[in-house]
Amino acid sequence: MTTATLDVSILEPHWARLRALLDHGGNEAAAYLLLGHADIGVDPWSGEPRLRLVSHEHRDIPEADRVSASPRHVTWSTSGYMRLLSDAAARDLVPAVVHTHPNGRAFFSEQDDANEAELARTARNKRLRGLASVVLGGDGSVVARFWMPDGSTRDAAWVQVVGHRLSRWGSVQPQDGGAEHLDRQARLFGPAFNTTVGSLRVAVVGAGGTGSPVAMLLARLGVGRLLLVDRDVVEVTNLNRVHGSRRSDAEARLPKVDILEREIDLAGLGVQVRTRRAWVNEPGVRDSLRACDVVFSCTDDHAGRALLNRLAYHYGIPVIDVGLRMVRRPSGGHDVNGRVTTLVPGHPCLLCGSFIDPRRAAEEALERANPAEFARRKAEAYVLGSGDPAPAVVTFTTEMACVAVNEMVAMLTGFHGEDGMIATRYRRFHLRDDRFLAATSRPGCPVCDTGEAWGRGDVEPFLGMIA
């Protein structure tokens, strides 16, 4: 962890309460957070370790603990801090102190250095992994750092607020947003949009009918780093919808992710592409996904969706899920439906929207883990099996890929409203309309309703999923 690059993600519900600290009559104010952690062994782009901290719980400093405040200082009793440390130790979380500079920019002052050094020493004495610190400036700036076990500090490379909208503040020099090939979109959204998009680390899980156009669109949009995950090779029956694929690729049985990497590299747009020819639940893929800022779920299996569904909330990583269903009616005519669901705190999860079949997810996981047992159960009619291949038409799959990528653009720009991403958009091609489903979290849902999973980070078993 001593060499790990640091990212800090603050979930939107917690951010709203932190922003309220700036409304204390011009005086500084403070609060606590408990943070989940993602200890990423190998960043897929740098090859180095990475540490991601994610807000899990906000705590006000009790009125009784507040001592004094002015435009240049805030002090409080540490009795509440000691309780924070005890809870962090019991739950394997990281404690954090947040305070404001309401009349200027966010930075760590010499007084902050001295005060936090004492707080960090106390955290070390409790054998915690460290102490995080966040400063909010009245000018809209944000900085964060982490006090290491040896007493040194590490500045956050990125601080981001995750919710319907995504906001980012970086301490590193981002990719130039003035690239000539991105000029036309800068004329609409401004050069800052290109800079932000260029800083993103985006995964596309599934490289088929929806995943392949999503990957191509993200590359053209200027995403700086792409992770492509799919274990399948391209077949002749894929050529009608997998972008970039050729008949020679199918004859050679090339992996879908390798085809997309080739085509994106040939475009010469400066995108750093990494590929994982594996299922999404394999340990190496898990590590790579936790290093991403946004994930597109373009997989057609329920088990993969179930994992990404939990990943979104546990790690504060927006997941944009794409699904299609095309049916030819026996009586004539067609039902062609597409769906894009965005998974962030405040939006219902895929289970609550009934977009995942838990039984199918369990069967798919069994088929991968124990094919012999799956075959036995299928023979005895205990499992359903995969059935016939579903219909797929490139115009419909590509259109829903565009809808999905536009949700990411909305998250960054608010172009279709300040609320940012839509929870679920359901496109009925055959009826020529869009529906915006008003699904809600089921009371007590451990993924999206109670907040227990929000920002929880690393737990055992992974994502709390029992195999």
Image (cartoon, rainbow, N blue to C red):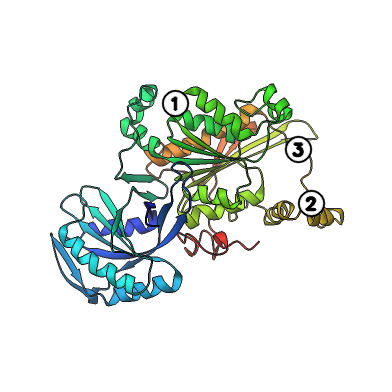
Can you tell which mark lies on residue 384?
2
Quadrant placement of the C terminus: bottom right
Q: Which residue is mark 1?
A: 269
Q: Residues within 10 Å of mark 3 (few under 14, many from 20)?
A: few
- Front residue of 4 and 52: 4
CA gap between label 3 and label 2 equals 14 Å
Identify the amino acid type marked 1. Answer: Leu
Q: Residues within 10 Å of mark 2 (few under 14, many from 20)?
A: some
Q: Which residue is mark 3?
A: 389
For this orientation, the residue located farthest to the right is 380
CA gap between label 1 and label 3 equals 35 Å
Q: Is residue 194 above or below residue 145?
A: above
Residue at (62% x, 27% y) in the render: 395
Of the residues under marks 1 and 3, which one precedes in the sequence?
Answer: 1
Q: Do tag 1 and tag 3 residues touch (Cβ < 8 Å)?
A: no
Identify the amino acid type marked 2. Answer: Leu
Q: Do tag 1 and tag 2 residues touch (Cβ < 8 Å)?
A: no
